[in-house]
């Protein structure tokens, strides 16, 4: 296959993708509670767009909570505590997050 044939083949795929996008944009809108489920149901109708949607929707949402967790971990793992084991640091972070989320409570011994 020469360069011109490869170009035409890529162009044909792009045109199909454009037609798929036009079809999606012209479809009636509907209320969706779970976008991943909607794309799963319509993956045969929009094969290329659904793959793009799955790629984008797979990215986890970020918040400042992650930054706070890393910042707090710096208090457990630092130069003044060089022998702190990784398992301890992980357990410390998990326990702290669970307490803040109300999943566990601290009960003082009798």
Image (cartoon, helix red, strand yellow):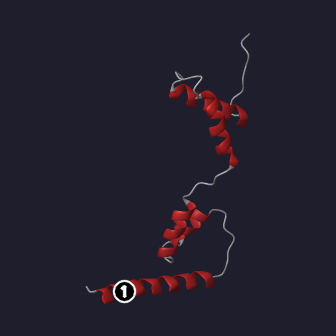
Residue position for label 1: 7
* Quarter location, residue 72: top right
Q: Is residue 10 above or below residue 89?
A: below
Image quadrant for the N terminus? Answer: bottom left
Residue drawn where x is 62% and y is 39% of the image: 70
Counting from the top left corner in percent of width and height, residue 74 is at: 62, 33
Counting from the top left corner in percent of width and height, residue 93 is at: 62, 32
Image quadrant for the C terminus? Answer: top right
Residue drawn where x is 37% and y is 89% of the image: 8
Counting from the top left corner in percent of width and height, residue 100 is at: 72, 34
Residue drawn where x is 71% and y is 37% of the image: 101
In the drawing, does residue 8 fall left or right of residue 97?
left
Q: Residue furthest left?
A: 1
How many numbered callouts? 1
* Quarter location, residue 6: bottom left
Counting from the top left corner in percent of width and height, residue 61 is at: 63, 54
* Quarter location, residue 21: bottom right
User: Tag 1's secondary structure?
Assistant: helix
- Which of the pair 21/64 is nearer the observer? 64
Q: Residue furthest front?
A: 79
Residue drawn where x is 55% and y is 64% of the image: 56
């Amino acid at each position: 296959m020469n360069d011109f044939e490869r170009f035409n083949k890529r162009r044909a795929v792009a045109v199909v993708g454009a037609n798929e996008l036009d079809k999606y944009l012209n479809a009636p809108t509907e209320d969706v509670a779970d976008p991943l489920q909607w794309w799963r149901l319509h993956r045969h109708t929009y094969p290329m767009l659904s793959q793009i949607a799955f790629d984008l929707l797979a990215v986890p949402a970020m918040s400042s909570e992650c930054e706070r967790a890393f910042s707090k971990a710096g208090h457990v793992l630092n130069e003044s505590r060089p022998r702190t084991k990784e398992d301890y640091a992980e357990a410390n972070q998990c326990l702290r997050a669970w307490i803040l989320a109300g999943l566990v409570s601290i009960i003082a011994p009798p």
